[in-house]
Image: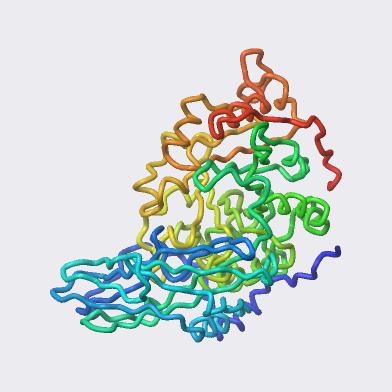
Amino acid sequence: MKICNFSKISLLAILLSCGGYVFTSCQDTEFDAAPVDESNYEVSQDQMGYIANNDGKINSASLEVQAGRPADMTLCVKATKPSGAASDVKLVYDEEVLNSYNQDTENEYLAFPSANVTFEVGNKVGNTVTLPENSQKSGELKVSFTTTEDMEAGSTYVIPLRAETASGSLKFAETGSTFLIVVKIIENLGDNYKGDDAVKLFSVIETNDTNPLNHLCFTLKNTKKYLFDYVVLFSDNVIIDEDGSVHALVNQQIVNILNNREKYLKPLQDRGIKVILGIMAHHTHASVCNMLPETAEVFAKYIKNICETYELDGIFYDDEYNAPATPTPPGFYANKSVEAGARLVYEIKRAMPDKVNIVYAMGEFMDMSSAGCTIDGMTINDYIDYVMEDYQATMMIDFEHDFPGMPQSKYGWRSSQFAKGWWRTDDDLRGVMDRGNCHFIFAMDPFRDSFDTPYKNGRKDPSGSTQLEELKRMARIFYNDELVYDEKPYLPDHK
């Protein structure tokens, strides 16, 4: 497979694509986080409604289903404030909702067959829910659907829904009246499927010297399932060239892996292991946390092109290693901010609602409680799927405050650092299960000394553990099973 010829994103192209926006000088592009004077704004007195699912996501939510299998999603109607009167709201299948979305986002998602979609309220067929008086949440409406055998694995379908007020005073803005259920067809749940409530194990690997195929070396003895659920290719880079172009696909080892995805990535995905592309700065001004909204929107389309070309499952965001420049390059803020980082993550989720967004709680992403992280009515829970805690951030992150609205099940508590031997205790690993269902490890590699030689704090230590012992403990504590290592590691032949 040859590498796709991705054009660099020139700032002129960004200017043109944004309808003639003119980026001003550096002093004008400083991000001003001061409160906006709202005294001249008229606040709507109406009770406004919107659709949400059980996870609190609005506008859209995605899930994976095998061809020929049934699935369902539970929705409800929420309101901005209570009202003295009840309202009845009808949810209807409306293909025009999908047509408008495809046109706005340059996607070509297929409409899920309406004949295969049914609605149920209170265990009875129906598509109307009631928002009671003095309440801000309706009863539940279950949308059930059945995929067909002729739906090809890898294809994506969308169930487009629109809310209509049948009676009462509840009103809907256009963006709040629609909801997209994004259905990605898969051949099977993969040999790594350990149950819906099982801990999801993420491996963030140093692709410069680690072959991603090493994740096929680890299975569970009793269930025969593969140990790992996600592999993050760490890390590709975002840079600005001397000519002002901003682009990714900078790390040559990752480029080599992507160009040979049939060898390095498809075997993982065929077994249900998702492959995520990591992106971070590379010693230029460009960062994942300093793009202007117009730049972020265009860059999101660029990332979408990469993910679709190489059939990747999502993006991992790391705010480290940029080098601020003076004067500030066009298209960027002079300084980084969590609001700018949130905008990029939001734009990429908007462009690819079926892809996984993972944020590393480092740099500006350590605290996402800012009001500016809610974008177009969407909170961080709507456009971020998982958060990885830093290995040393245990005393620095207040999850409920710093990531408001996100369930603990999406937070990778007590991440493990395998290269330096920063191991976790049994209590730490049990705590992962108590607080959520995901755990991140960094730098797993059978060819590192720490794999089978006791290590502690980056040095050989007879009292330390090893990567292999840690994986055995995770298999035992997370899955009540025994780890099997086939002792056939893969050399890093992609360099």
Q: Is residue 317 left or right of residue 91?
A: right
Residue at image x 30%, y 78%?
89
Judging depth in this view, the residue of 33 and 180 nearest the camera is 180
Residue at image x 57%, y 71%?
351
Most distant residue in the top direction: 462
Residue 463 in the image: state x and y as whole percent. 62, 13
Q: Quadrant of residue 11?
A: bottom right
Q: Is residue 12 visible?
A: yes
Residue 319 in the image: state x and y as whole percent. 56, 51
Residue 260 in the image: state x and y as whole percent. 83, 56
Residue at image x 53%, y 35%?
391
- Does 403 sit above or below residue 143? above
Judging depth in this view, the residue of 467 and 144 nearest the camera is 144
- Does 204 sit above or below residue 51? above
Q: Is residue 91 left or right of residue 166?
A: right
Quarter placement of the N terminus: bottom right
Q: Is residue 58 left or right of residue 350?
A: left
Q: Is residue 244 visible?
A: no
Most distant residue in the left direction: 84
Q: Quadrant of residue 304?
A: bottom right
Residue at image x 72%, y 20%?
453
Most distant residue in the front direction: 124
- Does 132 sit above or below residue 481? below
Judging depth in this view, the residue of 149 and 395 nearest the camera is 149
